Image (cartoon, rainbow, N blue to C red):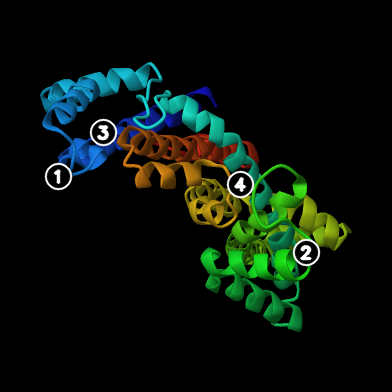
Amino acid sequence: MRRFLIKRFITSLIVLWGVSTLIFLLIHLVPGDPVQAMLGESALPSDIENLREKLGLNEPLFVQYKNYFFNLIKGDLGTSIVSGRKVSKEILSRFPATLELAIASILVSILISFPLGLLSALKKNSIWDISATTISTLGLAIPNFWLGPLLIILFSIKLSIFPVSGRGTLAHLVLPAITLGTALSALLTRIVKTSVAEELKEDYVKVALAKGLTKSKVLLKHVLRNALIPIITILALQIGSLLTGAIITETIFSWPGIGRLIINAINQRDYPLVQGVILFIAFIYIITNFLADIFYAIVDPRIRYETKY
């Protein structure tokens, strides 16, 4: 198990280094002067030069990369040009709101997808299966930027049940969580259905039923455990997607998370903050996939021995 975790950890570090290097190159090698873009066309040459020196952009590219890389190792993502605060502090002040929304969205998707997926797999080609497939297809087809305003019109303006925007109470969380969780639940429903249906064909299910175990016990204790691997994969990938997909939802519901932070940073041309947020989201992707690998080994111990690389 230790060897398995060490390999996964080293792989994650290599990926993180590659992503951080790519972000650095994209920011520094794209056409145009970022300092000019930050200050605007009417900026004085002296102001441009002062800001360029402050950001270290007057140094050779290799020196800039070296400083950037060693600052990353120390956890220094730079300083926001607009607020003057450390980028890491800006991100950490907004991350709890985005994490809260992501967790709530995942819970919504699980509550919808697992019952629908299980019912669809157990009642194949029945009206339940057709209904579950139809619901999941609709969930995939409805975009966040359409569903969010629709929920606001219905539940906030017409029925006055939930607040229109902001964060503070559980009621503020309901509509954004449903908006984000709907698309994920549609995808998870299909994965749960396919995985469980495949496991139900296995011989161990027939043996367990022949021994007198109830179908519900076989389903919950054996089938679901073996079907979890692809479900975990999707969830791990979608956690990162929820952070980036939350940009639209947070804007619609004025949710004070990382999504709104990066939109404001782009509008204000705060390049250090934009770069820091992108790096942070990439880091979350890598961490969630690393944790998923660990969970694979817990759910299916064969993985830690069969993996050879």
Q: Which residue is mark 4?
A: 102
Helix, strand or loop at label 1? It is loop
Q: Are marks 1 and 3 in contact (CB under 8 Å)?
A: no
Q: Position of residue 235 (x, y in %)?
A: 57, 50
Q: Quadrant of the N terminus?
A: top right
Q: Distance from label 2 to label 3 (Cα)?
A: 48 Å
Q: Distance from label 2 to label 1 (Cα)?
A: 48 Å
User: What crowding class fits label 4: few (fewer than 14 Cα within 10 Å), some (14-19), or many (20 or more)?
Assistant: many
Compared to residue 49, the image places residue 160 above or below, namely below
The quadrant in which residue 286 appears is: top left
Q: 127 and 6: which one is in front? A: 127
Query: Which residue is painted at 66% across and 67% down in the image?
Result: 151
Q: Amino acid at mark 1?
A: Gly
Helix, strand or loop at label 4? It is helix
Q: Which residue is mark 2?
A: 160
Label count reads 4
The disc, 1 or 3, on the residue closer to the chain's N-terminal end is: 3
Instruction: Look at discs 1 and 4 and give the one toward the viewer.
Output: 1
The quadrant in which residue 159 appears is: bottom right
Q: Position of residue 45 (x, y in %)?
A: 12, 31
Q: 242 and 205: which one is in front? A: 242
Q: Distance from label 4 to label 2 (Cα)?
A: 24 Å
Instruction: Look at discs 3 and 4 and give the one toward the viewer.
Output: 4
Q: Amino acid at mark 3?
A: Thr
Q: Distance from label 1 to label 4 (Cα)?
A: 35 Å
Q: 46 and 97: which one is in front? A: 46
